[in-house]
Image (spheres, rainbow, N blue to C red):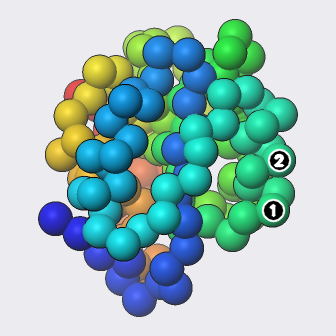
Amino acid sequence: MELDLHGRRPRPLAGIGGPGSQRSSRPHFAGRLGAHRILGPAASVGEALALIEVQSLNAAVLDVNLSGQMSYPVADALLARDVPFVFSTGYASNRLQEGYRTYPALQKPYQMTELSDALAGLMAPADAEHPSETGTAPLAA
């Protein structure tokens, strides 16, 4: 199943994950998304910020915990660049920092179909409702 870009220009997707992220699934993840280039993972907040500073991205998968640091500064940088993202976390959604709980989140461990569905939701046309704008519950596994 190839990810539908809904007319967006093909750009890389970023996998930003810390220790324990599902890095071993990266080849399968890339294959599921067809010709999309996957960047990362970035294992720290600094690496992630450097990655998104120099790359134009379609979307990102953002681990909440990056080597012991919470990734909220990375989420803010993605938001400032209008890059949609989905959190990847082992935390319950109510443990996320206030203000970030309405963004899509995948509960680890998750299946590739869940990841594909989450990314497809991020790539939906701009006129479609976005979970962060509607206040709907985050994605959950």
Q: What's the amino acid at mark 1?
A: Val
Task: Give the class, few, some or many, for how many residues have Cα within 10 Å of label 2's Cα (few <14, many ≥20).
Answer: few
Q: Could you tell me if the residues under marks 2 and 1 are in contact, i.e. CB atoms within 8 Å? A: yes
From the image, tell me which residue sits under label 2.
Answer: 50
Q: Nearer the viewer, residue 119 or 21?
A: 21
Q: Nearer the viewer, residue 139 or 51?
A: 51
**Element at label 1:** helix
Q: Using the image, determine if residue 40 lies above or below residue 2.
A: above
User: Is residue 63 among the parts visible in the rendering?
Assistant: yes
Q: Nearer the viewer, residue 57 or 118?
A: 57
Q: Residue 125, position in %: x, y?
A: 39, 78
**Element at label 2:** helix
From the image, tell me which residue sits under label 1.
Answer: 54
User: Is residue 137 among the parts visible in the rendering?
Assistant: no
Q: Residue 17, position in %: x, y?
A: 56, 30
Residue at 18%, 46% (x, y): give it. Answer: 113
Q: Which mark is residue 80?
A: none
Task: Give the class, few, some or many, for how many residues have Cα within 10 Å of label 1's Cα (few <14, many ≥20).
Answer: few
Q: CA distance from mark 2 to mark 1?
A: 7 Å
